[in-house]
Image (cartoon, rainbow, N blue to C red):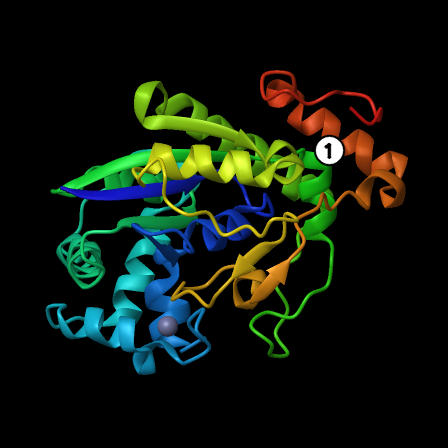
Amino acid sequence: MIRVLYLAGSGRSGSTLVTTALGQIDGLFAAGELRYLWQRGLVEQRPCGCGRPLPECPMWSAVLADLPPHDPASIAAGLRDRLRMRNRLRVPPSPDDTTIAAVYQAIHEHTGGAVIVDSSKLPPYGMLLSALPGIDLRVLHVVRDPRAAAFSWRRRRSLDGDERLMTRHPVWKAATLWTVWNGAVLSRWGGGSYLRVRYEDVVQDPATWVRQIATFAGAAPDAALPFTENGLLTLAPTHSVAGNPVRHRTGGVEVRADDEWRQAMSPRAHAVVTALTSPLLGRLGYPFSRRTR
Ligand SMILES: [Zn+2]
């Protein structure tokens, strides 16, 4: 069986930081957002976490060499079509699934059987993975205060160092996505193969949470963690596909709460996001009012 730790949830929830931290641990491989392997990695040739174009990265060129003949653009188009949230969580099977399964098989082989950390987040892609033969899926549900996520969606930031900006959503759209995606995760997964963490808790005590997540994923309980004595997260390059530019950071990184939104978000935006996410706010442990905790 190929163990996959699937990070599920909505965007701008700190999943790239968690994935990059996990990728430093023995027995875990940070693959990044594998649903974007075809479009962003192979069609657009955006850089791997190690900085090279994907086909030139030693890890990915080895994986690609193991795949059956395929057309990345057509797999990307097929995924865009099959993974629409309006299909609910019914993902129609496709002949492309053989190639997609071969990617996980090849990573498994080239990493000596490491747990594959896939931060694709989109719930339907998690459904697709769970239906592939030979995949043993564990789901890590990463949630973040939707006001913080909506605020982050408004920021301007370059993607992979080029002129193109990361997608920006208006607050109402960010809030709607938060509710729909997190609701889908809650409706589909639970029990022993599911772990939910809050971004706010992780940044408060990263070493404890990274240990807990790594053990849940299947790492040895005494595997070395990437933290210095004074709490800095030590990052070496990973071979992660797509995702937030934070995946390119290396060296000692101070993990701290990004809570600029508490001062900078307008009361109106706060009210809009709170209203649109209210069905899940309390359930996921977030207050309705602007108080700090
Ligand atoms: Zn690489």
Please indicate whether residue 56 sits to the left or right of residue 108 in the image.
right
- Residue 290, position in %: x, y? 84, 26
Q: In the visual, does 84 lie left or right of 130?
A: right
Marks counted in the figure total 1
**Residue at 40% of width from left, 45% of height from top?**
84
| Residue 93 image position (x, y, % from top left) | 18, 45
Say left or right for 43 vs 132. right
Where is 155 relative to 59, above or below? above
Q: Amino acid at mark 1?
A: Val
Residue 176 in picture, x, y percent from top left: 61, 36
Q: Nearer the viewer, residue 195 or 74?
A: 195
Decide which of 266, 283 is in the foreground and name it: 283
At 35% from the left and 35% from the top, the residue drawn is 221
> Which residue is situated farthest in the bottom direction here?
56
Q: Quadrant of the N terminus?
A: top left
Residue at x 34% of width, y 18% of height: 191
- Would you name the residue on which mark 1 appears? 273
The image quadrant of residue 70 is bottom left
Front residue of 108 and 87 = 108
User: As displayed, is residue 195 above or below residue 104?
Assistant: above
Taking the image as shown, residue 100 lies to the left or right of residue 171, namely left
Asked whether residue 247 is in view, the answer is yes
- Image quadrant of ligand 1 equals bottom left
Quadrant in which residue 96 is drawn:
bottom left
In the image, farthest residue toward the front: 229
Q: Is residue 91 visible?
A: no
Give x and y (percent) for residue 14. Answer: 58, 46
Q: Is the CB–ligand 1 distance for label 1 below 8 Å?
A: no
Locate the C terminus by quadrant: top right
